[in-house]
Image (spheres, rainbow, N blue to C red):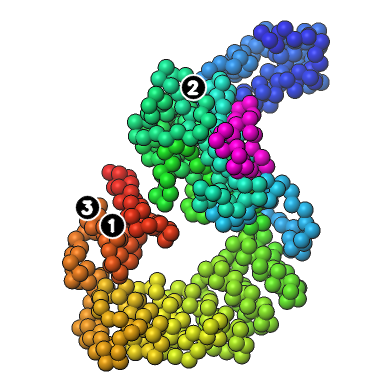
Amino acid sequence: MVLMERDRTDTCTDLEKRAALCRERIAARNGASDGGVRLVLAVLCAILCPHAPSCGANEPACDAESLLAELQSIGVGWQDSVAQTEEPEAWTLEPIEPPPLFDIPYHDILNPARPVQGSRSYGSVSGGILVNSRPLPLDGEACYVLRSHVRRNAHWATDEMLELVERTARRLAERFEGTRLAIGDASLPEGGDIRRHHSHNSGRDIDFAFFIRDRRGRLLNPTGLVRFGASGQTGSQLFDVERNWYLVRTLLVESKGQVQWIFVSRPLIQLMLDHARSIGEPEELIAMAQQVMHQPSDSSPHDDHFHVRLYCSRQDLLEGCLNSAPRWPWASLYEERHQARVEELLSGLAAEEPPGQIQLIDFLVQIDGRSAISPLVALLPDRPAEVQLAILAACRQLRASGVGREVIALYHTSSDPTVRAAALQTAVTLPFAEAADLLAELLADEEPTELPGRPPASRVAAQALLPIQEPAIVPNLIDALGSRDPQTRILAATVLARTTAKQDRVDWGGATANQRRRAIDAWREWYQQNRDLPRETWIRDGFAQAGHPLAEDLHNPDSLYPLVDLTEAEEPLAYLATRMLREITGAPGPPDRLSSRRRKAYWRDMIERQSEADY
């Protein structure tokens, strides 16, 4: 043994340091008590320090044979303790230790000279920046940046990402000799928009090349990204299922569940999950991987690389790093620590003058402090105009709800036109139930508002109603078709069509007064006949009259495909089809920036995945 060949004059103090790995293995695998660990140290002392009477004042004399026998009697074998035997790897996801619930004083939080320790990921992955970034190894022992990506200078990340990459690469190299993890793009040195990506802005995203081998099983070190289809084969190159699965496994374990997404194509996901089951991986780990691995529908299928995303670290979350959904049940998003910071910032509102109050409010917005909205709105009546404006802006930016009464009251009572304009802007972003009365009132108000450009209030209300299909507001919308403002009429007609699926084929911007009058009468007659019917009936009738009858059971995947086809139809059918697909599937839908063809592909993909999951 290597240990027996060492200089036997090593002190027990030095020996204890060299036995650290041994202690950890025994404690983890056998639940050894302190006494059990001392026994191990005593055995090591007996072998390596035979002339020493003891290994510490409280240890027994070094009798190797009796100590070995005692060690074996508690279920810890000598070979288990020291030799690096090959065994199935255990899987545990250790929880991250909860942080303390105190925070630094609010004036220290706001101090612009406060030193920033380590890296900082600010904002979202698609709209953020990176401060004090760390470079990933261009050519390390266990990982390297792909030759095709080096010149992009996109190999920068947060401390947490760098540490995860290095730990993961080491684990892979230990498991598979000669294996090196190939890195694609992470982020630019200061974050921000990066070519070829919609995310990667804030140091929490990174791409890894797949592990590849040839037909003879030899590992290949890729110099670029290689695309694989469902078979896991491209020419003479094979998707190395074993190594790629171990990469996924290690990322989940080494990050302690802080990996939010691993984007990769669905056929390759299936290959890895099948392999995991075949080697007896725990079902909990497989279930976790099945949720975290995902083929995106709003970008490339990721059939040539892994795209890994982390949640915000604890410190970044307190400074303005923004997580997006979903939050997996095993992940820690530090809610209690975040709330402690919100409360500390709120505590300064009573002590600070208006400039300081505005600073506090701005920082609450920066850290997504939505729990602060109610306390802030309660301050609206008694604060100076500049603070009221900051509170109203916070309501809009944090997508507040439950504050309609206070905001609308301020709109009606304030004598400051700037505050009234901000209150109106805020009110029309509230949930319909909170702003319904105000919107109905505004639809009939053709006087200019205090908003920039001074549009009539009716136009502001109609614009706010575009994403809302609420039957109760239909009579007010019909009345708004008679507005003097052409834009109000066009907007009101659009909302009516989206709410009812009825198409009137009227040019509400250019039609004559008589044409508009006849069309309004037709709308009133229609509403009189149909107002007691549920909106679902309106929608089905509207689709049928347009030549697209809908099935009774829209939750059946076969019934949903006609709706998918209608996402490319004319308005309002395309809009309504998309809304219905969102409601039925629960999916958020593709980004507006996508073409109609790609939006249609998104929905077909979504339905197929949900159908497979149900099956």
Q: Main secondary structure of the magenta part?
A: loop
Mark closer to the chain start, 3 or 1? 3
Q: Is residue 471 visible in this depiction of the protein? A: no
Q: Is residue 95 above or below residue 22?
A: below
Q: Residue 46's x, y, as percent?
A: 73, 10
Rendered image: mark on residue 558: 3
Q: What segment is highlighted magenta in the picture?
A: 134-158
Q: Is mark 3 on a helix, strand or loop?
A: helix
Q: Residue 23's x, y, as percent?
A: 67, 24
* Circle 1 residue: 564
Which amino acid type is marked by label 2? Leu
Nearest the viewer among 235 and 365 is 235
Is there a contact, CB below 8 Å, between mark 3 and mark 1? no
Residue 149 magenta-highlighted: yes
Residue 319 sits in which quadrant? bottom right
Question: Marks 1 and 2, Cα distance to the nearest angstrom?
Answer: 43 Å
Question: Marks 3 and 1, Cα distance to the nearest angstrom?
Answer: 10 Å
| Point 56% across, 16% down: residue | 85
Q: Residue 260's x, y, as percent?
A: 51, 46
Question: Marks 3 and 2, Cα distance to the nearest angstrom?
Answer: 44 Å
Q: Please tell me how crowded label 1 is: few (under 14), some (14-19), or many (20+) other residues with Cα within 10 Å.
A: many
Give the quarter of the figure containing the N terminus: top right
Q: Please tell me how crowded label 2 is: few (under 14), some (14-19), or many (20+) other residues with Cα within 10 Å.
A: some
Q: Please tell me how crowded label 3 is: few (under 14), some (14-19), or many (20+) other residues with Cα within 10 Å.
A: few
Residue 485 sits in which quadrant? bottom left
Which amino acid type is marked by label 3? Asp
Residue 335 magenta-highlighted: no
* Circle 2 residue: 219
| Point 63% across, 11% down: residue | 69
501 displayed left or right of 450:
left
